[in-house]
Image (cartoon, rainbow, N blue to C red):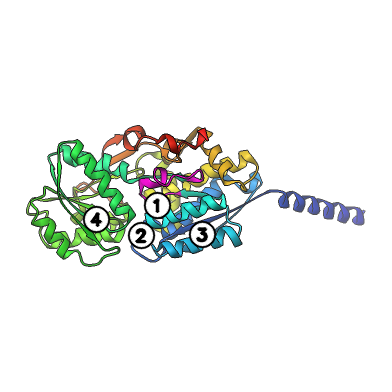
Amino acid sequence: MIRKLALGTALGALAAGAAFAAGIDVKLGVLNDRSGVYADLSGEGSVVAARMAVEDFKAKDKGLNVEIISADHQNKPDIGSGIARKWYDAEGVNAILDVPTSSVALAVADITADANGVLLDSGAGSTALTREQCRPTTIHWTYDTAALANGTGKALTEAGGKKWFFLTADYAFGHSLEENTAKVVEANGGEVVGTVDVPFPAQDFSSFLLQAQGSGADVIGLANAGGDTVNAIKQASEFGITQAGQKLAALLFFITDVHALGVQTAQGLSLTSAFYWDQNDQTREWSKRFMDKHGAEPTMVQAGVYSATMAYLAAVEALGSADDGKAVVAKMKEMDIDDPLFGKVKVRGDGRAVHDMYLYEVKTPGDSTGEWDLYKQISSISGDDAFLPMLDECDFTKK
């Protein structure tokens, strides 16, 4: 009897092992800034978000054996490209997540297409990801520079900020943000009275801010992000720029930036975001769990990593494989996605994930009731109004 029981147990264990081995192996690489100016808005928080997605998807119960690795691209295209090649060629990575810094993301998009992997980009802003450099293996999930322009740029111009001067981070993201915002400003009756390219990353904005101050602009548009935006706002405050009547437009501004500045300094700033932790019951529930794990409220980039990963895993489950990146992305474009953090999402033929965006204003110290109670919603922007129309040549559902 004991021998029969032992044999039965052994056979059961063997069958279980065979079933596990026959599962779908999925390897995800979170590639982002883990040590520089974008570390707070992406960094380790994006890894936490990806792990939460795997847990909430109940990947193991569905036969998906998911492994997550991560690396720091240091905001350098050559380093990011080297990591991406190694991941695809030698380490069996199926999809790369996050990738803030547009110059890195554009390089990784090309490598991903060559490797037939998947790029689930949440952190980069350049519209080129779904236009000039559209690829059948790219999903641009969270935001882009056109959506930011159609939010903050349009709102401030309509409110009377007709003359703009741009401080622009001198790389793909900054130039894309300046270009998209300038078009929106001009379309709404405004004009650009000057621009200056700022090295990326930068510590000292004094000479650039003095140029903007002397330009006679109503609005100084900060076409940068993360630590650069925080430093520029701090130094603008020291120069008394806003006190003298000019308005700052933080064209890409994250909750971690507001938290770092404090509401006393950031109050009244307008910003556009795809996500805010306190928006509804679902975002609050998820954000509480994220906060418990990470110690800060999630940025829209980190929320986007979670959501894109959930949709990706659903596509892999439906296909029964993660090996063919083009097929996985094509499946994601077929899906009706109702996401707990972003609401209804449709991935277009060009890889642009279309969803609502929101215009917020930073609360005053008197209105804020807690450390992370920082935004009040001004308006919502439909996805069709926020994002650029799809180019026919980038509709990969027709190819």
Q: Main secondary structure of the magenta part?
A: loop
Query: Viewer-proximal residue, 68 or 164?
Result: 164
At label 3, the amino acid type is Ala
Tell me the quarter of the picture where residue 69 sits.
bottom right
Which of the numbered marks, if any, corresponds to residue 83?
none
Instruction: Identify the element where label 4 is drawn.
Output: strand
Q: Residues within 10 Å of mark 3 (few under 14, many from 20)?
A: many
Q: Which residues are magenta?
A: 121-138
- Residue sitting at x 44%, y 49%: 121
Q: What residue type is disc 1 on?
A: Gly
Q: Residue flagged by tag 4: what amino acid is it?
A: Thr
Distance between the alpha carbons at the discs numbered 2 and 3: 19 Å
Q: Position of residue 17 (x, y in %)?
A: 75, 53
Instruction: Tell me the distance, in whole angstroms, between the alpha carbons under discs 3 and 1.
Output: 16 Å
Name the kind of residue labelled 2 in the image: Tyr
Alpha carbon of mark 4 to alpha carbon of mark 3: how far? 28 Å
**Residue located beneath label 1 in the image:** 123
Q: Evaluate if marks 4 and 3 touch, with contact meaning CB atoms under 8 Å apart.
A: no
Q: Give the mark nearest the N terminus, 4 or 1.
A: 1
**Residue carrying label 3:** 84
Q: In front here: 28 or 348?
A: 348
Estimate the x, y position of residue 136 in percent, counting from the top left.
50, 43
Label 4, on which residue? 168
* Mark pair 2, 1: CA separation: 9 Å
Whether residue 360 can be seen here: no
Q: Position of residue 317 (x, y in %)?
A: 61, 41
Q: Which residue is label 2 attached to? A: 38
Asked if disc 2 and disc 1 are in contact, CB closer than 8 Å, the reply is yes
Separation of residues labelled 4 and 1 (CA atoms): 18 Å
Is tag 2's residue or tag 1's residue first in the polypeptide sequence? Answer: 2
Is tag 4's residue or tag 2's residue first in the polypeptide sequence?
2
